[in-house]
Image (tube, coloured by chain):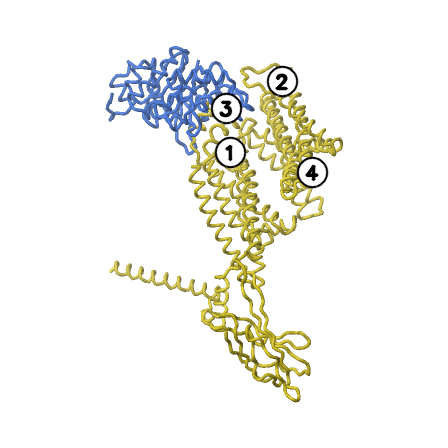
Amino acid sequence: MKKEVKRLGRSIGIGLAIVFGLVIYAYGFKVIKVNLDETRSPRRQEQLVRILRALAKPDLIEFEQTEYLVDLPIMVPCPEGGYIPPEQDTSKPYIVVTPSCADPGSMAQIEGFNFAPNAEGPINFIPPSQVKLTLGRFQADETGHFFLTVKLPNRKTTELNHLTATTRTRVGGPSLSQNAIDTWDKIVETVFLALLATTLGLLFAVPLSFFAARNLMKDVTSPLLNVSLSILALPVGAYLGAMISNFAGSTVNLLLKDSPLLNLIGALVGCALLYFAVRWAVPADELQQPAIRLRVMRIAVLSLAVLVSLLSLYMLSSLAMWIGNTLEVRLGSIGFLGTFIADLGDILGMTLTVISALAGAGVLMSLTDRLGRKIIKATTKPMAKGIMMVMSAIAGAALFFMIMAGLDWLYQFKNAALTIAWPLGLGALLGLILSIRLNPRDNFPIGLVIYYIARTIFNALRSIEALIMVIVFVVWVGIGPFAGVLALSLHTIAALAKLYSEQVESILPGPLEAIKATGANRLQTIVYAVVPQIIPPYISFTMYRWDINVRMSTIIGFAGGGGIGFLLIQNINLLNYRAASAQMLAIALVVASMDYISSRLREETI
Amino acid sequence: MLQIKNLTKVYEGGVQALTDVSFDVPKGQFMAVIGLSGSGKSTLLRCINRLVEPTSGTVIFDGEDVTAASDEELRLIRRKIGMVFQHFNLVQRSSVLTNVLSGRLGYVNPAWSLINRFPPKDVQKAMVELARVGIEDKAAYRADELSGGQQQRVGIARAMMQDPKLVLADEPVASLDPVLAHSIMQYLEKINQEDGVTVLCSLHFLDLVHRYADRVIALNEGKKVFDGLPSEIDDEKFKEIYGREAERVG
């Protein structure tokens, strides 16, 4: 009895589930506005057929054609005393109209002879005003004869009108149409767009991916005092680095702007100095800590070397720009090589500021890290705790102030209490609370904090399609492939960094442990234990991403990002389906071959 | 040389891996650590160079407190402690030479090592160490092209590159066949006797313990249950270490 009730309940349950499922799909049909009448309507079907036929004939090839014109004078209406048309040359194509003159608006029969077999073309009516009117199209049979009834236009004149039959015949072989040439240009642009975006993405994603790898970051811990000092050191160091770099840049610009020879000598001398300085100050092997004087000397020499190398890099940049600009003019058709060199020089100059800001931050942070350790070691526990609390409060305040400054820049609050007092107070309070809960020697998991921040940023960036990002970049650098490259690069950075970091997380822990046990530092551990393990998956994912980028760059033009999509959307909007078809074909070919090439390359590298 | 005092390790999640383990290892001793799988042998060895962070207790190595060392001090201590692993832990895609040279990472200047440049005398030393374990002809091979026994010899060469005072060997022969096991153990014995390197080696097979070790300690569920000469392990002791149901094999 009980069993049956149970079974009944089950059946009802299943029935309800099915009904529920049906309701969901019914609602789906309503939302999607499924309209089957449209699919059956003859008008729509006719359009569909037209488009399909256009798509099946991509506009790739055209033939050169010559026009052959047969002319027959005709009077509309008939003049008094009748009209006899001039004699036709019957050895060539000719037309005869019956009647030879007629009232406006009446019907006339046109008969053609001696035309090329299967020739076709328009029958035009040309009044004295020369504004031609197409009366119809003729189609000759195999013998070159045709017969067509047309309606004469409703216009009176006493002068001669002309009836013409025009045929076009192909001469010579096929040639590529203008559309095919444009498509080729744009598909090349598309492939390079994908290549540049992947390369740029790769350059940023590789270093960033380590920050998003949990197995590496969870070991990065530091006492809270050091973290606080580092937070304070970060902006100061970055600012100092950027200042030094700008100083070097403007010095070079001021002194050596227009003398490539001095730039060349400067860059060479700088490199040589750098080489000797590094050889002297960075010995290959060091078993004991050297004396303090030697260490100070080394630091001084290295700082000088950094300045010299900055100067010579700026000289190199300005040299490259000079060479590039000169070559651009001289090289003619391959002048783009010169432009490329000049652009590389420009990029070098631009990135130097960023790099030296990062380096400045890094140097100052490592100095404050040492300072923090010294403080913890040299002071008593309550004293260290006191210093830690003060520094942590200051760091918290500074951090919140910086975050708020960023928000203020975006939203323009114009409210001093909100942008200064609140973040300072809140940050200090949070810093203080954190420092009260921790001991001076406790390790704060700063690595995990960075890991979560990096992950969040990558996930957020990844969830915005490049097609949407390009809208912002189009505003910045204008419509064209450059905007597309920037948008795709940004998306690639986030996507590749995520994929890469997952590869770092899945490496074998054994070698990592072994290298750590030899007394290697963190960077050495990464280079010797992590990098060899991740090279094959990195290559494979980069190929995969290039493949995706090729596909993305075919449509990024829809939003103004250049490439073939730009041409495609234009032709679709102009209802020029035969031209659009050529572009679709090109996309299909490129994507398919890219698919094949990338999978082959991936097989080769693993 | 090595003093371990009241070492305790509780993993996150509450697994008690070591409970109050204390012992001293004098210089030049070949000491074996035995016990069932999961008895805490690996954790004990890893606590000594802090690959695993001990929960409490102290490790004194060569007069330095390992447990209280800062990151930088720990690095300097670690380079004096070589380590050999059960699964060799070589970097599979790197060459044998690079694997051996990586034992030198704690000594060389970090900046040069990042671009894979080692001083010539380190490269020479690497070749000497490879010759000592009889595989100098394999230096240019990729590590994963070598057999298990050869890989473990690379592991020993890597540890020896550190000029270690102590070698921690975590079941160095557990993934090798008995013949290879003896040859690997002989290399460890050689560095113990010729170079005077202290060896702390966890082992599964008692015959290896009898053959090679000067002294043995036994762990059971994280507690030290035996400390003495290998010859002192009779059937009664054996059952105490490995449990009542255990039977001796070899």
Label 4 environment density (alpha carbons within 10 Å; few <14, some 14–19, many ≥20): some
For the C terminus of chain B, the image quarter is top left
Residue A358 occupies which quadrant of the picture? top right
Q: Share a chain, discs 2 and 3?
A: yes
Give the distance between the C-alpha atoms of the residues marked 4 and 2, in whole angstroms. Answer: 46 Å
Subunit of label 4: A
Sequence-wise first label, 2 or 3 = 2
Give the distance between the C-alpha atoms of the residues marked 1 and 4, in whole angstroms. Answer: 48 Å
Name the one closer to the observer, A476 or B15: A476
CB contact under 8 Å: marks 4 and 2:
no
Residue at which label 1 appears = A217
Q: Share a chain, discs 2 and 1?
A: yes
Q: Colour of chain B?
A: blue
Please indicate whether residue B167 sits to the left or right of residue A576 in the image: left
The chain drawn in yellow is A
- The disc placed on residue A59 is none
Name the one closer to the observer, B247 or A426: B247
Label 1 environment density (alpha carbons within 10 Å; few <14, some 14–19, many ≥20): some
Disc 4 is placed on an element classified as: helix
Residue at which label 3 appears = A520
Q: Is residue B103 above or below residue A446?
A: above
